[in-house]
Image (spheres, grey):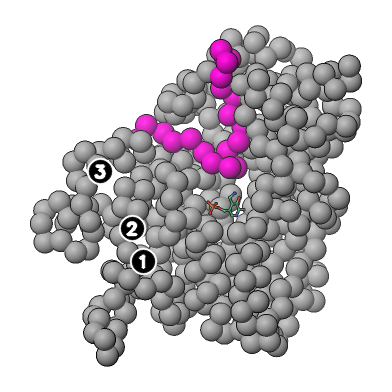
Amino acid sequence: MKMESEVLRHPGHINSDVARWREDFPVLRETIRGKPLVYLDNAATTHKPVSVIEAEAAFYRHTNSNVHRGVHTLSQRATDEYEAAREKVRRFINAASTREIVFVRGTTEAINLVAQSYARPRLTAEDNIIVSAMEHHSNIVPWQMVCGQTGAELRVVPVNEAGELDVEMLGHLIGPGTKLVAITHLSNALGTITPVKRIIEMAHAHEVPVLLDGAQAIAHLGVDVRELDCDFYAFSGHKIFAPTGIGALYGKETLLDAMPPYQGGGDMISSVSFGETLYNELPYKFEAGTPNIAGAIGLGHALDYVSSVGIAAIAAHEHALLEYATELASGIKGLKIIGTAQQKASILSFTLEGVHPHDIGTILDHDGVAIRAGHHCAMPIMQRFGIGGTARASFSLYNTHAEVDALIAGIRKVQEMFQR
Ligand code: PMP
């Protein structure tokens, strides 16, 4: 095995596309205690390319104005750029109309919106919502809250030892009282890609709509909401090279149209009097208050960036990294990979016998290797595997095979320290 310093000094080891992509991300030039940053925490958040950083700065430098309200030039410019970003989101996920794209803070807000605006008015004590055992807390707690408010039941589809969803069990759980199935498209804790097409077909056979948590999938799998025929799709910009505090909820127009507003305030109305308030049309009905205008514009540029590289090229590169990392990690005695599904993307979650995941993370950080350690906001799936947490390396387009070598060298170092 090559030593970390050796491989990182050999840029020839990096394929030329990746070398070019790395140039687009200034933060990758940072050093941590004199060592090159090896950023393997992309499932938590991704870094931003220059085009996104500059688009956000350019908005504040040249445009900064509120949207939808002003007659002056800057406000019109801000509105045009904000709405152009909505069109970019629509195109990226192939929604039928921009009326189906609601800007939100991120996946969490999108799911809370659907829980409170779609599910709450429809749920009774006889009804249920179905999630899986490997959901992020963002796709559990909003449903627990709405079940608490209505007396409905939260049903959980189990996963097998490999971390794959038990689709047959889902078939048994869906019943006449099921009002929604809410499932992750790609698990942040295990890396499992869920069979969403099949899940959607099964749910639709019972006329049950499906929400997909696309927080992870958006940056790694091509998402076509019309091809999937999902009813809601939630994602966060910051997981796909855009700023934090911006994301999108896709919802089929017929569903969104029938839903009451989630929050009240400016911009979501067409007229207000103390006698009666009329709500604005889609999607503005769901965008109360001044939105994250610069963030939305940044998101548009991030999606442009991904489209220019090509999601297929990204996925192929990440898959190669995951296979390489899995192979090397499998050779480490005492290392157990948590999440060994047939269909996986970009995430290597593992435990190391006798070592707390936080210790792995801390020791790796000393050598500039950034990974995640803990329950990854998915405590129920950790409980399923009988563990408190894992160490997680998650890959993006700018990661290299040499960085995987650095990770593996770091893990071996951790082991040596704990064996002493
Ligand atoms: N779902 C999944 C699968 C995630 O990975 C995350 C973020 N870790 C979320 C939901 C929540 O995303 P956000 O914090 O951006 O709202």
Q: Residue 330, relative to residue 188: is it above or below?
A: above
| Between 234 and 71, the one nearer to me in the picture | 71
Work out whether mark 3 precedes mark 1 in sequence or the reverse, and give the earlier one.
3
Give the structural element (helix, strand or loop) at label 2. loop
Give the distance between the C-alpha atoms of the residues marked 3 and 1, in whole angstroms: 20 Å
Residue 60 magenta-highlighted? no
Residue furthest out toward the bottom: 275
Give the structural element (helix, strand or loop) at label 3. helix
Type of amino acid under label 1: Glu
Label drawn at residue 59: 3
Residue at (59% x, 24% y) in the render: 38
Work out whether mark 3 precedes mark 2 in sequence or the reverse, and give the earlier one.
3
Q: Residue 259, relative to residue 395: is it above or below?
A: below
As drawn, is 91 to the left or to the right of 65? Answer: right
x and y percent of residue 410 in the render?
73, 21
Identify residue for label 1: 287
Q: The N terminus appears in which quarter of the rendering?
A: top right
Q: Is residue 193 visible?
A: no
x and y percent of residue 166 in the render?
79, 63
Residue furthest out toward the left: 72
x and y percent of residue 276 in the render?
28, 88
Q: Is residue 33 visible?
A: yes
Residue 44 magenta-highlighted? yes
Give the structural element (helix, strand or loop) at label 1. loop
Give the distance between the C-alpha atoms of the residues marked 1 and 2, in whole angstroms: 7 Å
Contact check, label 1 and label 2, Cβ < 8 Å? yes
Give the distance between the C-alpha atoms of the residues marked 3 and 2, in whole angstroms: 14 Å
- Classify residue 142 by image quadrant: bottom right
